[in-house]
Image (cartoon, grey):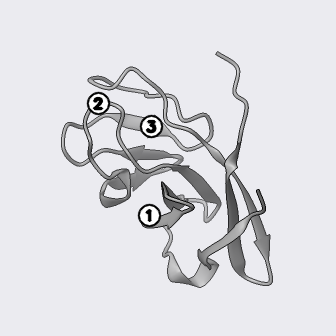
Amino acid sequence: MAASRACSVDEIAVGQAKRVVIDGVPIAVVKDSAGDIHAIGDTCTHGDISLSEGFVEDDTLECWAHGSRFSLISGKPLSLPAYEPVPVFVVTITDGDIYIDPSDTVAVDA
């Protein structure tokens, strides 16, 4: 599957997240505190909650409902109640646009 355009880099402010759906896969596209772009699964593994509505701090995204924080780098939960990771997707930026292939996830060490 080829990468699809998710949005432009300018559509996301530093410290914000945006929900996109590519090929039926909900993805949170995040610009972290350093201005780096990340893409992780948009559904909290603790509850069926959109992570893109949560809070960005440094390189984490916190679920607004129950406070679980997820690493934007590894997708691993950093606090309870979530204990399962969310997928992390490969991001490509071309001419100011963000492209994501929802079948292309980042392999992370356990």
- Going 54% across and 58% down the picture, which residue do you hit? 32
Q: Is residue 86 above or below residue 72?
A: above
Residue kind at label 2, given as amino acid type: His
Q: Earlier in the sequence, mark 2 or mark 3?
A: 2
Label 1 – label 3 distance at C-alpha: 13 Å
- Check disc 2: other Cα within 10 Å, few if <14, some if 14-19, many if 20+: some
Residue kind at label 1, given as amino acid type: Ala
Residue nearer the viewer, 95 or 103: 103
**Residue 85, percent across and down?**
48, 28
Q: Earlier in the sequence, mark 1 or mark 3?
A: 1
Residue nearer the viewer, 108 or 71: 108
**Residue 7, percent across and down?**
58, 77
- Going 65% across and 48% down the picture, which residue do you hit? 89
Label 1 – label 2 distance at C-alpha: 19 Å
Q: How many marks?
A: 3
Q: Which mark is residue 46?
A: 2
- Check disc 3: other Cα within 10 Å, few if <14, some if 14-19, many if 20+: many
Q: Which residue is mark 1?
A: 17
19 relative to 33 in the view: left or right: left
- Going 55% across and 44% down the picture, which residue do you hit? 72
Q: Quadrant of residue 92?
A: bottom right
Q: Nearer the viewer, mark 2 or mark 3?
A: 2
Q: Quadrant of the N terminus?
A: bottom right
- Check disc 1: other Cα within 10 Å, few if <14, some if 14-19, many if 20+: many
Q: Which residue is mark 3?
A: 70
- Going 34% across and 44% down the picture, which residue do you hit? 62
**Residue 102, percent across and down?**
64, 52
Q: Are marks 1 and 3 in contact (CB under 8 Å)?
A: no
Q: Earlier in the sequence, mark 1 or mark 2?
A: 1
